[in-house]
Image: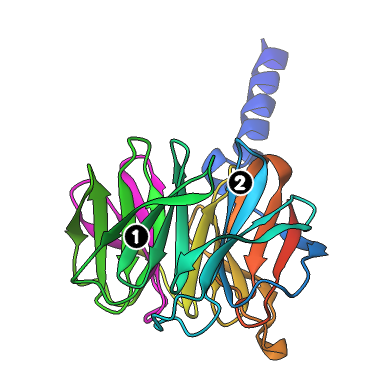
Amino acid sequence: MKNLFLVVILAVSIMACQPSNKETTETPKAPTLTLKWETDTLLTTCESVIYDSVNDVLYVSNINGQPTDKDGNGFISKLGLDGNIVQAQWVGGMDAPKGMGIYNGKLYVSDINRIHEIDIASGAIANTILVDSAQFLNDITIDATGKIYISDSNVGNILVLENGAVTEYVAGVAGVNGLLSEGADLQMVSFATGVFNTIDANKQVTLKTDSIDAGDGIEALKEGGYLVSSWTGKVTYVSPDWKNTLLLNTSGENINAADIEYIAEKKLLLVPTFFKNKVVAYEVTF
């Protein structure tokens, strides 16, 4: 009986020494970026890049001038996953194309105060929607139902395109730029204030983290957390517990990091460099 008592005491002591799950919870390790390739410098003022998983290609928006000039110089390029430029001017006829989204065989592109709908199969602009109230349409994200959300950075509004009509979704979000649809929520970063907010289905805006210099693009990681680009040339990892880790900083080389894309199955981050006229690919590893 005495021996049994000693065994129980020993077992309790060992269990007491074991850390609880709460105590062992740590901030997830930040990923690392390894350079994979760079395109030729033929992508003139490239602002955004998006992956077309159906056709296994990349599309890049090229302002080809100043971001607010209605000069007709803008175009979309088509790239291979190895960085080779398949077609430099795949679709033209735009002014200053920026954010892009893909839904049901269509590529949607923001363009100052217009939204273009490109038929991917034909490579032609099928429809253009004028948004009279807009000043600087920027990023695009599309939810699972096909609702298209567009940031108007200068006005500070998020718009939604549904059934051919554009309406105001959320107003008064200073410098809103990058958008990401996740379930019923929108994630957003601000170019002007450097905040990362979540906007829920009730349009409630909640601050998650800040100090993201000139926030531009957002991409979610399946391991948890987000990659966020800063137009000044940075990429930041925002962990699931909303802590920031700087992964890339090319600002000292005057290389921008505009609206990024992340291909989870290939662990590939694509960074358009704006004035440096190329897209740079990095492998993301944990």
> From the viewer's perspective, is the residue at label 1 or at label 2 nearer?
1
Q: CA distance from mark 1 to mark 2?
A: 48 Å
Residue 34 rendering spot, x and y as whole percentages: 80, 62
- Amino acid type at image mark 1: Ile
- Is residue 134 in the magenta section? no
- Residue at 31% across, 42% down: 184
Work out whether residue 109 or residue 14 is closer to the camera in this orientation and state it: 109
Residue 153 rendering spot, x and y as whole percentages: 33, 74
At mark 1, the secondary structure is strand
- Is residue 189 in the magenta section? yes
Left/right of residue 226 with respect to residue 132 in the rendered view:
right
Q: Is residue 235 above or below residue 140?
A: below
Question: Which stretch did the figure color magenta?
Answer: 177-206
Work out whether residue 151 or residue 109 is closer to the camera in this orientation and state it: 109
Magenta: main secondary structure equals strand
Work out whether residue 33 or residue 110 is closer to the camera in this orientation and state it: 110
At mark 2, the secondary structure is helix
Q: Residues within 10 Å of mark 1 (few under 14, many from 20)?
A: many
Work out whether residue 220 or residue 261 is closer to the camera in this orientation and state it: 261
Name the residue tied to disc 2: 24
Name the residue tied to disc 1: 115
- Amino acid type at image mark 2: Thr
State which quadrant residue 248 falls in. bottom right
Q: Is residue 124 above or below residue 170?
A: above
Residue 94 rendering spot, x and y as whole percentages: 44, 68
Q: Residues within 10 Å of mark 2 (few under 14, many from 20)?
A: few
Q: Which mark is residue 280?
A: none
- Residue at 48% across, 70% down: 216
Q: Earlier in the sequence, mark 1 or mark 2?
A: 2
Q: Is residue 44 above or below residue 286?
A: below
